[in-house]
Each structure stands twice: as structure tokens, then as C-alpha cells.
Image: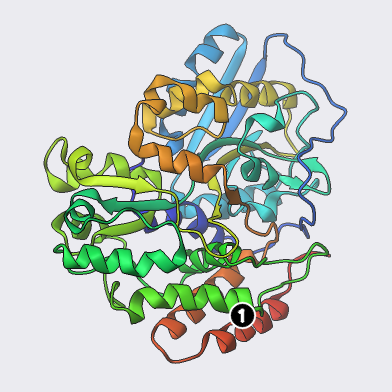
Amino acid sequence: MPNLTRRGALRLTAGMALGAALPLAGCGRNDDTAATGSAERVDDSPAKGTVTVWAAQGDADVLDKVVKPFKADNPDLVVKTTLIPNGEYYTKLQSAIAAGKGPDVAQLFPESQAQFVDPSILRPVPDGLVDPGSFFTSLWDAGVVKDVAYTVPWYAYTYALVYRSDLAGKAGVKAPKTWDDTVPFLKALQGAGARRGLGADIGWDVFNGQDVAMYAWQAGGSLMSADGKWTLDTAEMADALTYNASFFTAKTADTSTPTFLDAQPYFVSGKTAAMITGPWVVGQLDTAAKKDGWTASHVATAPLPAGSAGSASFSAGGSWGVLAGSGNTDAAWKLIRYIAKPSTQVAQYKAYGSLPAVISAWDDSAIAGQPLLDAFFTQLKNTRAFPQVSTWQQVATRMGKEMEAVAKGTTTAAKAASDIQAYAESVGTGTE
């Protein structure tokens, strides 16, 4: 996995969206149809000319290595890849698009790409380029607006429960299946020696807002109605805020620690015994413990505990789009088609640890042989896309702020839900 903590990884994507507050176009998504929508077809002839690719540093660092076979098979093609620092990526991409100087192909992020998913910015995915059903549904849906797909998923991640299996064994407990089981499970881990059951924080930011959204889905709520209206002042949102606050009011989590930089050392040392986090952590804990094999003997994973409506999480990762102003769309789409192949996504995993967005790629022994990833695979099949509107990041940040207030007891969950709704209505959806 990338060398990032839970919050650090989200800052790679959602953080870039926060730095891109200037709307590029009015865009919003009110349907979930897995479609393409372009009559344009891409044939199997060799790709030619020059394709410029912009991507954020991180998963794309190994892209040239991964697509080397494609370039060898297409000798008349030149691929020019520009890697941009994570925190600057969306801002620079926006500026280049506005100036008419964007690349042919741009990396995007399913959880924060709404501002780009518009026909004035991206070209529709050609019919037959890829099979929409081969990807995790919510990742594909994140690029669909009005029955037209604009992006092709590349890599995937979501959240699951990562916990100290040794302490759970000592306490005689199994991973919680429901919300009601969660605090007792965390308390049992504390009884087995952990200082706190859960490593979590409540700093008000977009990342905690995403947690609230996840819990609202689990409670049976929605974030937007079918006609594109915010639906946040609900009993389900209040339940989500109350559930999150329960970790802190029960003292299974600390309102001041750990920060995202401390999460893994705290987990390894026993200061905390569980994390709600992404799959990258699996490959990092041996390093944090300074001992090979520590993870295998101390760690287990499980899908998220279910609320009254299930255990839905959110989908996130990377995707690709071809800009409307591209001068070589044929070669650009052929490159994306290659990146979307299961074998290419397995190669990306082997080179960097990016988990595939193509479901069948998870059958490869390199991934299937990693039992701690099983929970993430299960969870990825039960995910939803965040609202595909340009103001989502602002609303999520406000949700994080209200989450903190509820956890600290300075407001009620019902009042917080009302305040989130009022704020969301004030900023709107960015649609025309």
C-alpha cells in the first residue's frame, strides 16, 4: 500500500479537492446508471502520436513502468507523463484547463472529481472501450452524469475495521457485526491491555465528514435525494452523529489522540487497538513495529459493523479521464483501455500496492494470497459514491465540524443535523 496513514491517504485525494474550490462548470449527478454514452468507438489499431498524461505523485509514480509493455507494442506512440505534487494537483489541473493547456489524459479521484465530470471538461467514455460491470459499481458510478460516463476507474480503496487480533483473542471476543456490538468490543480490547479501544480523532475536517456520511448510510439515510436536494437533517444523520460520538463518550476513543501521524505507532504499541482505515495500513505495520511478521501474528481485519441498514462504506481511489481539449483522443483512450485491463491493474498492485478497481484482478494470487485484504474486498462490494456535486467537500467539512461538537457534548445530534442541512442549502450543489 502507499506509504500513508488513514488520514494521510485521504489528504492525497480529498485534500486536493479542497484546494480546488474554484468551480470549472456546473455539474451534478442525479442518477446511478452505469452507462457510457458516446457513439465514438476506439479500434484495435496501434496508438500513434503523442499523449500527455498528468497525474498526482503517489500511485502514479510507477505508471511509466506499468505501461512499458503498452509502449513497446505501440512504437509510434510517445507517452509524456507529468507527476505533480499531491497538494497542488487539482489546482494546477484546473488552471491548465481554464487556460486551454491541459493534458490529453488526467488522473482524477472518484471521491472528489465531481467538479470535472462535465462535457465541457471531459470527453465521454467511448462505447465498448471497457465493460462498466467489470468495476466496483460505486467507482464506476462516480464518473456517470445524466447517463453518460466520463471516467474509467484505475485503483480502489475503502474503509474496513483493522484490529489487534492478539488482544481480541486474549479478551475472548470476535470482530463486531453491528453498531451495538462495537463499543463492547472496543471495551473488551481495553480490558485486554489497550489504553483505548479505537484510534480515532474528531478534528473537524472533510475526512471526519466522510465518516459521518458513511455512518448515515449505515443508518439508512441518504445525503441527497433523487432530484438533487440535500437530505441531511434526518433521524438517520442524527443516529450517525450519535454513533460516532459513542466511541468518545464511552471513552473507548480519546478526543485528543491519536492524530493521523500517530495512528500506526499507537496501534502497534497498544495505546489503541483498532482503526477504521484503508488497506494501505496492512503493508505498513511491520515497519511501524520494526519487526517482520508482526502484522500476521497481531492483526486481523473485518468489514465495518452494520447499522440498521447495513455496513456500507464509501468508495475511493483513482480514475482516468480524457480532456475535452485533447488533441489525440484515439491514443489517449487506447492508453486508458490498457490501464483498465485486469493484468495491468495487477501489475500496478505489484509495483506500488494500488488495489485494483477491476473486480476480476482480485483473483490474482498476488492479491488473493493476502488474507488481511479479504475484508476490504468484501467491503468494496458494499460501497457508495459521495454526492457528485462540486460543493460536496465543503459540506463534508461542515459535517466534520458538527461531528466534533456532538462528540464533545457541546451540541445535540439533532441540532447538528439541522445545522449541517442549513449549511448545505446555503452553499447549494454547484449545479446550474
Position of 360 compared to 161: left or right? right
Q: Which residue: 66% across, 75% down?
A: 232
Question: Measured from the top left, where is residue 358 in percent x and y?
Answer: 57, 30
Question: Measured from the top left, where is residue 66 in percent x and y?
Answer: 46, 22
Rendered-image quadrant of the C terminus: bottom right
Compared to residue 138, the image places residue 199 above or below, namely below
Q: Spot the residue most to the front.
A: 172
Compared to residue 332, the image places residue 74 above or below, namely above
Position of 270 compared to 42: left or right? left
Q: Spot the residue most to the right.
A: 39
Rendered-image quadrant of the N terminus: top left
**Secondary element at tag 1:** helix
Residue kind at label 1, given as amino acid type: Ile
Compared to residue 161, the image places residue 39 above or below, namely above
Position of 60 compared to 371: left or right? right
Question: Measured from the top left, where is residue 356 in percent x and y?
Answer: 50, 32
Position of 107 compared to 161: left or right? right
Q: Spot the residue most to the bottom.
A: 410
Q: Which residue: 69% across, 50% down?
A: 116
Q: Spot the residue most to the left.
A: 291
Compared to residue 150, the image places residue 337 above or below, namely above
Question: Measured from the top left, where is residue 238 in percent x and y?
Answer: 57, 79
The answer to whether residue 199 is visible is no
